[in-house]
Image (cartoon, rainbow, N blue to C red):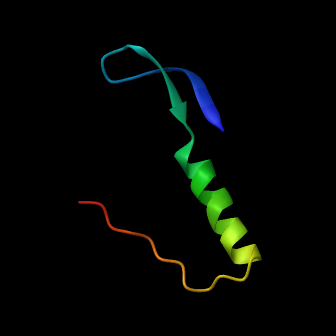
Amino acid sequence: MIVINCFDNQGIPAIVPDDQRGQHDLFLTLIKKRYRRIGIPKQG
């Protein structure tokens, strides 16, 4: 899913991916395929 009609921090129009929906779909797919050891990398 892509969110359109958004603006970045400087007020410039932008197209932004919906990361939360993408992550949800990814994990659902992994779980349906019976993956059990799913890791989430740390940022920073």
7 lies above or below 28: above
Q: Residue at x 70, y 76 (%)?
A: 31
Q: Which residue is drawn at 63% across and 50% down?
A: 21
Q: Position of residue 1 (x, y in %)?
A: 66, 39
Q: Position of residue 29 (x, y in %)?
A: 71, 67
- 37 vs 12, left or right, is right
Q: Looking at the image, how many numbered discs can be counted on the residues?
A: 0
Q: Position of residue 39 (x, y in %)?
A: 47, 76
- 3 vs 44, left or right, is right
Q: Residue at x 56, y 50 (%)?
A: 20
15 lies above or below 20: above
- 37 vs 43, left or right, is right
The quarter of the displayed image where residue 37 is located: bottom right
The quarter of the displayed image where residue 23 is located: bottom right
The quarter of the displayed image where residue 2 is located: top right
3 lies above or below 42: above
Q: Which residue lies furthest to the top in this view?
A: 12
The one of 11 and 34 positioned closer to us in this rendering: 34
Indicate the quadrant containing the C terminus: top left, top right, bottom left or bottom right.
Answer: bottom left
Q: Which residue lies furthest to the bottom in this view?
A: 36
Q: Position of residue 38 (x, y in %)?
A: 54, 78
Q: Residue furthest left?
A: 44
Q: Residue at x 68, y 58 (%)?
A: 25
